[in-house]
Image: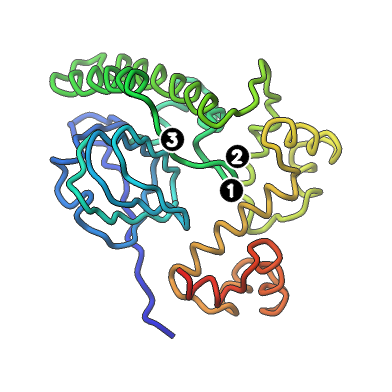
Amino acid sequence: MAAVEKIKTYHFLPYKYGSELLLDIGRIETLKNYVSNSTLHQFSFYEIIFIEKGTGTFTLDENKVSITPQTIIFTSPGQMRRWQIEEKVSGYTLFFEKDFLHLFFSDELFLYRFHYFHQYLRPTNMQLSEIPFGKCLELLYGIEQEFGQLHNDSNHLIRALLYQLLVILNRYYIGVYNVQKDPYVHSDFYRFRSLLEKKFVDNRSVEAYTKMLNVSPGFLNKICRQFSGLSVQQMIHYKLISEIKKQLYQNKSAKEIAYEFGFSDPSNFNRFFKKFTGTTPQQYRKEM
């Protein structure tokens, strides 16, 4: 077996500016080793990348995103990342901890309301035309200016600008990918998405989540299909396959992964993986 590739995890630095501030912004071209290091790594926080110039690829889990001007990339905590740069990249990176928004809005489900985070089915990037991309840059510039001269109330202004940016990005994302617009999304759908992120290793049945949510299987399937296009079981499987692929990145054996994710034996694990990907874990590792 090939040597295991160690995955470095980067954590947020909340006291970089003195008092606690759970958001930061930077110009990509000025951040040391930000894109020059092509090793596999992950963040424990959220990040949105805005590409103004440059070419190459950005791998997020098993998906490769082409780096081109006016590309926006959304990353959620724990996703595997790798930069492979061909021409120098410039633009903005915006990263933040969930509590920067959760504590203010008193809503643990807040970030699940945006289509581009914690995504299993649709892309985690989008290409914008010049005018909408420019609107994003204006808001980023406002955040950057506030970081240049912080005040006691700066976190409120920065949070307001971030909130505006996230909502605008969600509207653009809906337009780019023709996501169904619905004036009301049931809160149980967001609660399910949140539980799935936290509980998927130990709970892979529809029944487990309907009990946690105190709803019927029929109702949960209805709202999941309505707002994601997937059944409850499909969402569970997409999440599980995504996490298994992360383990395959690290060259763990099928036996190790099978028992880590609660499969009775490696053969059941191999059948499950092939059913949903069309390839065996060993073939997937080789292709990767």
Q: Determine the residue positioned at 49% across, 62% down.
A: 246
Alpha carbon separation for disc pair 3 and 1: 27 Å
Residue 88, x across and y down, in percent: 17, 46
Alpha carbon separation for disc pair 2 and 1: 7 Å
Mark 2 touching mark 1, by CB under 8 A? yes
> Which SS class for mark 2?
helix
Instruction: Report the colour scheme.
Output: rainbow
Q: Determine the residue positioned at 83% across, 33% down.
A: 219
Residue 210, x across and y down, in percent: 79, 42
Q: Which residue is mark 1?
A: 198
Q: Is 205 placed left or right of 44 in the picture? A: right
Mark 3 or mark 1, which has the lower sequence index? 3
- Up-down: is 175 above or below 160? below
- Up-down: is 146 above or below 55? above
Residue 6, x across and y down, in percent: 35, 69
Alpha carbon separation for disc pair 3 and 2: 23 Å
What amino acid type is highlighted by mark number 3?
Answer: Met
> Which SS class for mark 3?
strand
Q: Determine the residue positioned at 48% across, 75% down.
A: 286
Mark 3 or mark 2, which has the lower sequence index? 3
Q: Which mark is residue 194?
A: 2
- Crowding around mark 1 (Cα neighbors within 10 Å: few <14, some 14 to 19, many 20+) is few
Q: Quadrant of residue 108?
A: top right
Q: Which mark is residue 126?
A: 3
